[in-house]
Structure formats: C-alpha cells, structure tokens
Image (cartoon, rainbow, N blue to C red):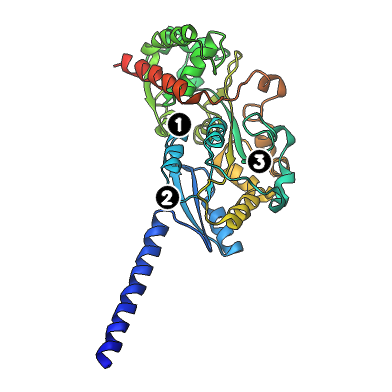
C-alpha cells in the first residue's frame, strides 16, 4: 500500500512539474490568458515604465515581444502558435488583416478613454468604424538633413532635391519597399499607391539614377548614423527624425511639396487573443491623456490623442514638422492595401533597385 501511495505521489509530482514547465514555456513563447497579456509591437515603441505601471495598476502581467516590419508581424500571426492579445500594425496591414479575418472586434463600451482621440484620426478608410483598431501614433515620411554638412542654402522642398550631384554618397534610405518606391513615384507626380506597370518601372529607373548619392539602405541604425553625422541626408519616418534631432540639434526635417506618406499605427486584438478583458484594459490605459503624453515624449512620434496633446510642451505640440497643417496633410496619402500580388511586385522592384547598387 505504501508503495502504491509513493507511486501516486511521484506521478502527481511529475504532473505538477510538467504543468509548471508548460506554463513557463507558454509564457516565454507568448501564450497568455488569465492574468497575463502578450503584446506584439515595433521595437522601442513604448515607454517601458508605462508597462510596469499598467502591471502594478491592474495586476496583469505583460509579455512584450517586438517585430521590425508589418510583413513579419502578419506572418507570425497568420502562422499561429504564438498567441498575442495586442498588436500594433500600420493601416495597410490592418486592412489586410481584416480581409484575412485575423482580428477580433473591439468593444468600445470598455474604452471610456476613447473620447480623448481627435476625431480626425477616427473613421479612416482602412477601418471606417474603428471596429478593429484604435489609434496609437501617426506620422509622415520625409527628408532629414544636416545643414552643417551641406552647401549653404541647400534645401529639400522637393523629392528631386535628393538627386543633386553634390550629395554623392551622402544619403541614407530606410530599408522599406513602400517608402522608397513611394517617394520615387511621388517625385514623378504619381500616387504612392500606383499600380500602373509603366509608372512603376519609370519610378524604378529614376531611383536607379539616385544610386551615386546613396551611401546605404539601412534599418534602425539609420538613427545612430545620422545623429553621428555619418551622412548628411536621410529619408526617414517622422518619429525617427524627431529622435535623431533630439540627439543632434543641427538636423532639420521636411516633407517635400509633392506629397508623401501619412501613416497610422493602431492597436488591434488578433483573433488568437486569450485575454480579451486584459487587452481592452491595456488599450484604455494607453488612451489615458497623461499616459499618452508621456508615451509621446518617450517615443517621439505624433499622438492622435487630443487631450494628451494639450499636456505636451509647446515646442512639441506646436512643431509643424511633426504636427503639420491641414494644407500639407491634404497632399499626403495613406498606404493602401495593394493585395498580396502587387505588394510582392513592389518588393521585387525594390530588391532589383537595391541589387543595382552593388
């Protein structure tokens, strides 16, 4: 009898160990539920102190993972296996995720702080009723430049200014097909969502003539390189420009007159979410004006939260480089979901452009 009891006790102990090991493995891989949520976000795109405050305020543990492109984010969510309660994709990715039924509806009744969002950033084309997404940050794509490394009076009012022969080996580009193909199209007077094959080939040919001026096509290191004056000019997202300029006050940022990209990153709930209450609590927490203002100062991108904007220092809230006038934003375009085939074609053209440089 004693041997039988010991046998059962041993089996019970092993079962407990397996349960604990499985729980730890699931947590490490992003499985959530109960008192845990897993967040999938861009790198360095939230003040980490706010995560700690959310955990303390709600008792909910946060597992935080990052991605470096919308495509990588969508692929991981499509594949399943790793559960995410919150993700923060861009507008065209949200449109695609809706089509592929990768998102769950958001219950607005659980988001009392939603009233703080400026109405200009609600009801946009990629989610007209905000049924699946809630604004997080917004911004533009433009040109950052260092006047101290350029000839006196050099400006960048037009995308064509990048083709100045004096800029040989002085330009850094972000490693993004939509961004680079986009300014190539804009420089020719075309939409950055253009799908006309002749226009796309024309843009690629024009971009190829920019090659002598391009020092490198890089990722996040573009911020360090520009702040460290390793290059005089960069094509970047506005938030990156703000961060670079905080490190080196010599630089300036402009959106060219032909127009550019107006982008939006929103909070969504993927269809694999296990902690819906926790997900809604996190979204509502991030919509609090004081939280949103602090996050804006940390990240450097533009906030869609009207109440948070009132709390920001004037030198941030009134800086038209990052909070442009309606006259400029009317010229800007949101990336549309081009469909899998056309998006692949954009990527192919961009890869051909990059290979042409070698």
Which of label 2 and label 1 is nearer to you?
Answer: 2
Q: Read off the residue under disc 2.
A: 82
Q: Residue at point 61% right, 14% down?
A: 257
Q: Read off the residue under disc 3.
A: 131
* Residue 117 to residue 319: above or below: below
Separation of marks 3 and 2 at Cα, in angstroms: 24 Å
Examine the image and state in which quarter residue 137 appears.
top right
Separation of marks 3 and 1 at Cα, in angstroms: 40 Å
Residue furthest to the left in view is 3
SS at mark 2 in the image: loop
Between 357 and 128, the one lying in front of the other is 128
Between 252 and 28, the one lying in front of the other is 28
SS at mark 3 in the image: loop
- The first of marks 3 and 2 along the sequence is 2
Which of label 3 and label 1 is nearer to you?
Answer: 3
Report crowding for label 2: few under 14, some 14 to 19, many 20 or more residues within 10 A (C-alpha): some
Q: Position of residue 255 (x, y in %)?
A: 58, 20
SS at mark 1 in the image: helix
């Amino acid at each position: 009898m004693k041997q039988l009891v010991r046998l059962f006790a041993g089996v019970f102990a092993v079962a407990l160990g397996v349960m604990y090991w499985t729980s730890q493995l699931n947590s490490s891989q992003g499985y959530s539920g109960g008192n845990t949520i897993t967040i999938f976000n861009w790198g360095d795109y939230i003040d980490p102190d706010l995560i700690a405050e959310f955990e303390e305020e709600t008792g909910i543990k946060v597992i935080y993972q990052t991605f470096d492109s919308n495509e990588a984010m969508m692929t991981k969510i499509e594949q399943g296996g790793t559960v995410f309660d919150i993700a923060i994709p861009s507008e065209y990715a949200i449109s695609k995720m809706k089509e592929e039924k990768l998102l769950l509806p958001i219950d607005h009744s659980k988001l009392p702080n939603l009233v703080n969002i400026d109405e200009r950033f609600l009801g946009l084309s990629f989610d007209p009723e905000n049924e699946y997404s809630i604004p997080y940050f917004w911004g533009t794509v433009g040109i950052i430049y260092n006047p101290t490394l350029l000839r006196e009076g050099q400006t960048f009012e037009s995308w064509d200014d990048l083709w100045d022969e004096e800029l040989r080996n002085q330009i850094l580009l972000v490693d993004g097909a939509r961004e680079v193909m986009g300014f190539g199209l804009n420089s020719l007077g075309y939409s950055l969502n253009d799908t006309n094959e002749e226009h796309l080939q024309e843009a690629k040919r024009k971009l190829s003539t920019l090659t002598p001026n391009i020092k490198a096509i890089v990722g996040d290191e573009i911020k360090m390189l520009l702040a460290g004056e390793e290059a005089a000019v960069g094509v970047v997202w506005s938030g990156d420009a703000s961060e670079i300029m905080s490190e080196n006050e010599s630089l300036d940022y402009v959106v060219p007159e032909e127009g550019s990209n107006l982008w939006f990153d929103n909070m969504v709930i993927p269809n694999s979410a296990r902690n819906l209450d926790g997900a809604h609590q996190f979204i509502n927490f991030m919509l609090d004006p004081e939280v949103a203002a602090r996050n804006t100062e940390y990240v450097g991108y533009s906030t869609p939260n009207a109440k948070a904007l009132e709390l920001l220092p004037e030198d941030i809230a009134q800086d038209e480089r990052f909070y442009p006038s309606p006259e400029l934003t009317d010229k800007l375009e949101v990336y549309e979901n081009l469909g899998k085939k056309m998006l692949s074609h954009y990527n192919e053209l961009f890869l051909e452009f990059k290979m042409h440089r070698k």
